[in-house]
């Protein structure tokens, strides 16, 4: 992409630009590629003689990727984009598909810290990727990314101070992805009961399978206790509805419709929901 966000046709450059939220600075690219290619050619000649002098198409993109000039803020934003399912948190552009973001985080969790990846996920519990330049990007999926930089490396090739800092941050802030929580945040907020409009439940946050189950449970109890025949679901404060949650809510709408309960879906225009509303209403 150019400074105005226009695609350049270079997939690597365009993706990196979208991840950074600004034009890529790869001023070191040509110099690093030239030096690194010579080193790589020598190593290949020593260990795999039959590939000596092979085409550089495979190695050049890798060396150029290693030559990007970034800040810790850039690293944090890259991590935050992956944490946000592939959507950049500032530009709101979709950089990669959700599945790509998920698979990237899976790789980071299993092998992103070289030979110390096992110890890392045990102690820190966040997907991360380090570089021999001294940078580390770590991700709390669904929440944030963090970038650190300190050049001195440990024997595994990871930033010594960066690893120590992130271990401390994870321990002090409870960031380990396998930490047990007493219960997930409630997806239901304020409840309004009105004789004319029935029961209205304000929903919030990201709705996954567990959240959808709770919404169905809470809705059933409220309808039973109030005797209302109309249920309003207000999505104004909902940030995302997972496909499985959408299917569960749609099944609930169908059952409610068959039981003579009218379901009103409120403030859901930006979510592009398809709940198969039958005699129910959208507002």
Image (spheres, rainbow, N blue to C red):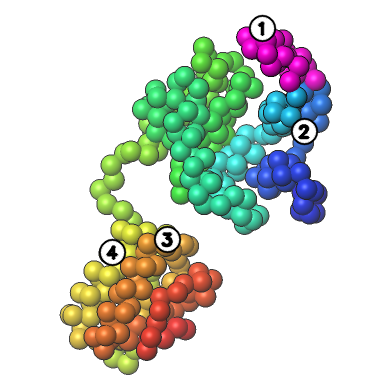
Of labels 3 and 1, the one closer to you: 1
Instruction: Give the labeled residue for mark 3.
Output: 242
Q: Residue at coordinates 36% horizontally, 27% vertically from top-left? A: 122
Q: Report crowding for label 3: few under 14, some 14 to 19, many 20 or more residues within 10 A (C-alpha).
A: few
Furthest residue in direction bottom, as rendered: 196
Spatial CA span between label 1 and label 2 = 30 Å
Where residue 256 sits in the image (x, y, percent)? 28, 81
Furthest residue in direction front, as rendered: 50
Instruction: Give the labeled residue for mark 4.
Output: 213
Label drawn at residue 186: none
Kindly report the secondary structure that dominates the magenta region of the rendered protein: helix
Q: Is residue 192 left or right of residue 71?
A: left
Label drawn at residue 46: 1
Say which element carries label 3. loop
Q: Quadrant of residue 67?
A: top right
- Mark 1 or mark 4, earlier in chain: 1
Q: Report crowding for label 4: few under 14, some 14 to 19, many 20 or more residues within 10 A (C-alpha).
A: some
Of the pair 114 and 232, the residue shown nearer to us = 114
Where residue 78 sits in the image (x, y, percent)? 60, 42
Give yes or no for residue 47 being in the magenta stretch. yes
- Mark 3 or mark 1, earlier in chain: 1
Label drawn at residue 26: 2
Q: Quadrant of residue 176?
A: top left
């Amino acid at each position: 992409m150019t400074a105005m966000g226009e695609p350049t046709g270079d997939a690597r450059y365009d993706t990196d630009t979208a991840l950074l939220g600004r034009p890529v600075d790869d001023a070191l690219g040509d110099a690093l590629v030239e030096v690194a290619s010579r080193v790589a050619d020598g190593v290949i000649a020593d260990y795999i003689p039959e590939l000596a002098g092979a085409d550089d198409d495979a190695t050049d993109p890798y060396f150029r990727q290693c030559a990007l000039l970034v800040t810790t803020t850039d690293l944090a934003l890259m991590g935050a984009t992956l944490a946000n399912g592939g959507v950049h948190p500032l530009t709101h552009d979709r950089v990669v598909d959700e599945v790509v973001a998920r698979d990237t985080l899976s790789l980071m969790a299993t092998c992103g810290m070289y030979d110390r990846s096992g110890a890392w996920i045990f102690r820190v519990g966040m997907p991360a990727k380090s570089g021999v330049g001294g940078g580390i990007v770590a991700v709390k999926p669904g929440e944030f990314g963090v970038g650190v930089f300190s050049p001195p490396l440990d024997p595994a090739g990871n930033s010594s101070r960066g690893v120590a800092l992130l271990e401390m941050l994870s321990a002090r802030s409870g960031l380990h992805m396998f930490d047990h929580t007493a219960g997930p945040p409630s997806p239901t907020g304020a409840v309004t009961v009105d004789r004319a409009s029935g029961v209205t439940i304000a929903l919030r946050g990201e709705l996954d399978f567990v959240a959808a189950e709770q919404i169905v449970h809470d809705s059933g109890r409220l309808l039973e206790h109030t005797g209302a025949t109309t249920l309003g679901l207000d999505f104004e404060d909902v940030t995302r509805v997972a496909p499985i949650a959408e299917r569960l809510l749609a099944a609930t709408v169908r059952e409610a419709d068959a039981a003579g309960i009218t379901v009103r879906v409120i403030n859901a225009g930006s979510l592009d929901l398809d709940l198969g509303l039958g005699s129910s209403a959208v507002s």
